[in-house]
Amino acid sequence: MHKGSVFTAAFSLYALIISLIFSNFIGAACAVGFFLIMVIILYARTCVTKGVFESSLNVACFLSVFITIFAVIERLLSHSDKLYRCKTVFFNPNYMATVVSTVVIICAYKVITKQGNQLLYYIIASFNVVSLYLCGSLFAWVNIFIAVAALLFIFHRHQLLSIFLLVAATGCIVLYSKPDLLPRLAESQLTTENRFDIWGVVIKAILKSPFVGRGFLTYYNIYQSYPGSYPTQHAHSLYLDPILNFGILGTALLLVYFVYYYKKLLLCRNLLNNSRISALIFALTASTLVHGLIDVTILWVQSGLLLGYIMAGLGIEERMLSAQK
């Protein structure tokens, strides 16, 4: 029903086959999981109404408060370690940070579009800022900055955008003077060096097999073949990881769907008079692409499904556009 969606099925099959060929059984499971998530997303894009969509975002906001409560309890139980990073119900702190920052962006979207109780969204956003602080993710703050700035710009809230940029600049100056105010900021150089080590291995592996790949989480399966390489699950780059995992061929299959998707998103944004959801999708896309420079935190069930569900909101505007014609 959606142009290009057949390529997601072809990509999933491709990812499954190459994973099995190279005995990458975790990657094979990921291929099946990716297909299932895409089925959910495409179904939501087809059927979800505007009321259900906005209510779902509210549910995500309300449930995020429990993440903060769990994080505070977890931190209190780990008081002996000053650098401890909370992860609560997530696989690691960076996945937690991605979901939590997405909720903050949703709250900003609700406030900017004047939906519901504004004070309530400020309170929920404050809870999630506490969660961000406790999980110790540095780049999640950049996610929020980019997405909120994009929302303010898209909705022509230029005065608020100026104030927001001024506050952000002031925050940067304060952190530069007192880096201890933000956990792990002093360690940023070390984490950057680790990523350069990872990317060096990834580029070498891509050059060995640029067209095919070995399936999801290829880095996890090959890093031991490179002495001195940094042990982790993926390439920590949204731009390198797909090419490493699936080669040029598989990555091209995946990109076809997104080309069709964003063409329709632009069409809805340009032709609809009240296209709020597309603004949220554009803002989250911008933050994801920038975060993708140093990590691939959307490669997980919780973070990927949340982002995918929000992107499925395009279907609402597609139907609005059809009705308008």
Image (cartoon, helix red, strand yellow):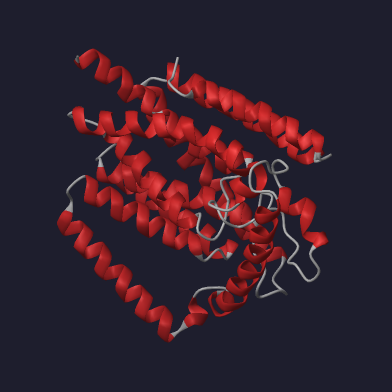
Number of numbered discs on residues: 0
Quarter that holds the C terminus? top left
Q: Nearer the viewer, residue 170 or 202?
A: 202
Q: Nearer the viewer, residue 115 or 136?
A: 136
| Residue 177 place in picture, x, y as percent | 41, 86
Could you tell me residue 265's position as x and y percent? 33, 32
Task: Specify the quadrant of the image occupied by residue 111.
Answer: top left
Tell me if I can see residue 69 in this picture. Answer: no
* Quadrant, the N terminus: top left
Above or below for 221 versus 37: below
| Coordinates of residue 214 in the picture (x, y in percent) | 73, 43
Give the answer, above or below, for where 174 lies relative to 268: below
* Residue beneath the point at 47% across and 32% down: 256
Splitting the image into 4 quarters, where does residue 230 fall? bottom right
Question: Does residue 222 sit above or below 278 in this rendering?
Answer: below
Residue drawn at (25%, 33%) of the image: 269
- Residue 254 in which image quadrant: top right
Give the side of residue 56 with respect to residue 173, left or right.
Answer: right
| Camera sees residue 27 | yes
The picture places residue 304, in percent across and down from the top left corner, at: 56, 40
**241 and 280: which one is in front?**
241
Image point (38%, 30%), residue name: 54
Q: Which residue lies furthest to the bottom in this view?
A: 177
